[in-house]
Amino acid sequence: MRITLVQGDITEQDVDAVVNAANSSLLGGGGVDGAIHRRGGPTILADCRRLRATRFPKGLPTGQAVATTAGELPALWVIHTVGPVYSPSEDRSELLASCHRESLRVADELGARTVAFPAVSTGAYGWPVKDAARIAVRAVRKTDTRVAEVRFVLFDERAFTAYGEALRAAGPTDEEIAAALAAQPDEAWRRLFDLADALTPDDLKVTWEGGEETEPGVRTVPWPGYSRAVRRILDALSELGVVVVFDWTEWHRRSPLFPDGRGLRDAPVADAARLATTYIRGERFRDGSIQQAIENGALQAILDRLRRWYHEERPASGPGGGAGERR
């Protein structure tokens, strides 16, 4: 799935489905809701009234989604979803994420391949746009869907900037990371696994240096010393593209795979790259990050997941890249 950003009017998008930031009544309102009803014409409202009379007599619940005709819009369908009202005292982020997941579920039921989203809940419902952008991008990225393109259509520069920052922070998708790893030559992967197989207990020992008192009351900052074997493995991971650009500081706070990689065996190989990035980049900000990965088993879990992917999941590539030639 491709995620794109557009600054403009959602009612003008030539896509299969546009998402309406509706209210629970489904009878129109202000903002995006009002614009879609005005541009789409009375057939959208007629469909909404039928839904209220049949499926949703009490209104569409927050976080859910339902489709109607798109009327006079360029799109084929409108997917109505009800975003949560922002509350500083209650975490409603799961409801906002649900709006995006449920909209994509409905899109799959319709057979829609291109879907345009507004910045749900950021208008009258008061959700801070930077946080809404982070939640929206993360929810869309994690949803298993047949939709080929999700287009976020942002009305103003502030929202466009916020969603762009959220998309950059999210980094490459699972598929993009896996494709980049698959493009690396077999020789480089074999070198990594040979280095891993040659590790000894002594190689995994960490010696701390520095910390001496250079003058009364002044000490140098201690730093960890890693063996040549460990440093070569870290270099090999970087050369293979296992270290990726994304907001690892946010990821590690939310991922159940951190800190020890437990569950990594059944996770996408992209998560092995994300966990490796967290520790390797983390070493620059906190000495001893790699030591933590060695001691808690995360480094071994990363290597094991990469090896399993290489032998069992990596698609066969060019000359000499067949699965039968891997070891």
Image: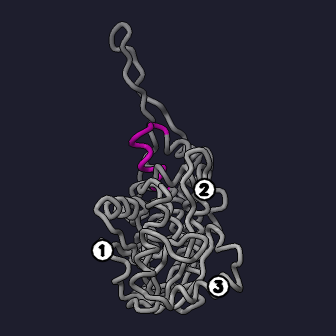
Percent position (x, y) of residue 249?
46, 49
Residue occupied by mark 2: 92
Percent position (x, y) of residue 35?
40, 76
Q: Residue at x 55, y 46 (%)?
A: 88
In magenta segment, residue 283 = yes
**Residue type at tag 1:** Gly
Q: Residue 8's mark?
A: 1
Percent position (x, y) of residue 129?
42, 57
Report whether 228 appears left or right of 28: left
Q: Is residue 220 above or below residue 264?
A: above
* CB-based contact (under 8 Å), mark 2 and mark 1: no
Q: CA distance from mark 2 to mark 1?
A: 27 Å
Q: CA distance from mark 3 to mark 1?
A: 29 Å
Q: CA distance from mark 2 to mark 3?
A: 26 Å
Q: Nearer the viewer, residue 139 or 34?
A: 34
Q: Nearer the viewer, residue 223 or 191?
A: 223
User: 10 Å neighbourhood of mark 3: few (<14), some, or many (≥20)?
Assistant: some
Sequence-first disc among 2 and 3: 3
